[in-house]
Amino acid sequence: MAAPSLASPPPGAAGDWTIPQGWDLYTAEDHAVWLTLYDRQAKVLPGRACDAFLGGLDALDLRGAGVPDFERVSDRLQPLTGWRVVAVPGLVPDDVFFEHLANRCFPAGNFIRKADQLDYLQEPDVFHDVFGHVPMLTDPTFADFMQAYGEGGQRAMRLGQLHNLARLYWYTVEFGLMRSDDGLRIYGAGIVSSKSESIFALEDPSPNRLGFDLERVMRTPYRIDDFQQAYFVIESIDALREAALQDFAGLYDRLPKLDDIPIEAIVPADTVYHRGTQHYAHTRAAA
Ligand code: HBI
Ligand code: FE
């Protein structure tokens, strides 16, 4: 199926691309897929996901009886950090996405994958968006970071620096790890919503696990088609918010003059938690 055009909102969507979630239209299969995915992750995430994620999952009572009603999730979330969840048909244009984040609205796809595609899907569905992204928005510091990211995204677009900011998003919000007293923990939505990557990201010897550094991350390409070859580790959610609140002007001046860092490289300035073998990526490439 060709990617839907992002030129203008699809029929039935508002100017900001939001649509009615249509909660009554979900089928018994849709609700069963939600519960299957939820229960599968509930088994692998204790001891792997960070406390803020697990706490958010409980605070929002996200298992329920199937696909959550965004209004009900928002009514629980808003008193905690001012965020709400709004329904969109799928990926929305970057400027629309940033505008929602800047207004503490998280745009979540309202569709859910089919039972025969539990492990792979083209676009973020409601499980990726609501199970993966929304629990972290119950943490006040992360909630501030996500709004700052939205505001930064609007600025980056004006400065033609979007590709650098997309890397920041990818290596934190989607595939970020953090330190804890008990070892590395997951907070990235792309990892917590995937059973196989929840295990791979923390335990497989293949990928590098490196200390987060804003400029380093913005110089590092990422994989969109497979497990990451590098994961970046933040010291704390506070540290992530501090990074986002700094002035990016100097960074945007320096970055165009700096080469990308190859995806599997480790550079002298890196804090190395794990030097990966890249065995997984190399065998996949050879296949
Ligand atoms: N749209 N609905 C939705 N969800 C996303 O995560 C999303 C998006 N549009 C653009 C986008 N993400 C990325 O390009 C961000 O890095 C901006
Ligand atoms: Fe996502």
Image: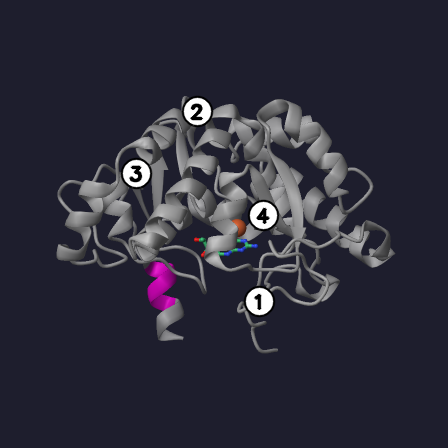
Give the Cα distance between marks 1 and 4. Answer: 29 Å
Q: In this view, does 136 lie to the left or right of 157?
A: right
Pinpoint residue 127: horizontal percent, then vertical percent: 65, 50
Task: Assess whether residue 35 is covered by the magenta stretch.
Answer: no
SS assignment at label 1: loop
Image disc number at residue 229: none
Tell me where residue 241 sits by quadrant: top left
Q: Name the residue that disc number 4 marks.
A: 193
Kind of residue at badge 4: Ser
The tag on residue 212 is: 3
Residue at 41% of width from left, 42% of height from top? Answer: 172
In the figure, is residue 186 to the left or right of 32? Answer: left
Q: Residue at x 60, y 50 (%)?
A: 128
Rendered image: mark on residue 182 = 2
> Which quarter of the rendering shows the C terminus?
bottom left
State the CA–CA distance, disc 1 to disc 2.
47 Å
The answer to whether marks 1 and 4 mark residues whose Cβ atoms lie closer than 8 Å is: no
Crowding around mark 3 (Cα neighbors within 10 Å: few <14, some 14 to 19, many 20+) is many
- Of pointers 2 and 4, the one earlier in the residue sequence: 2
Q: Name the residue under label 1.
A: 8
The amino acid on which the numbered mark 3 sits, given as a three-letter code, is Phe
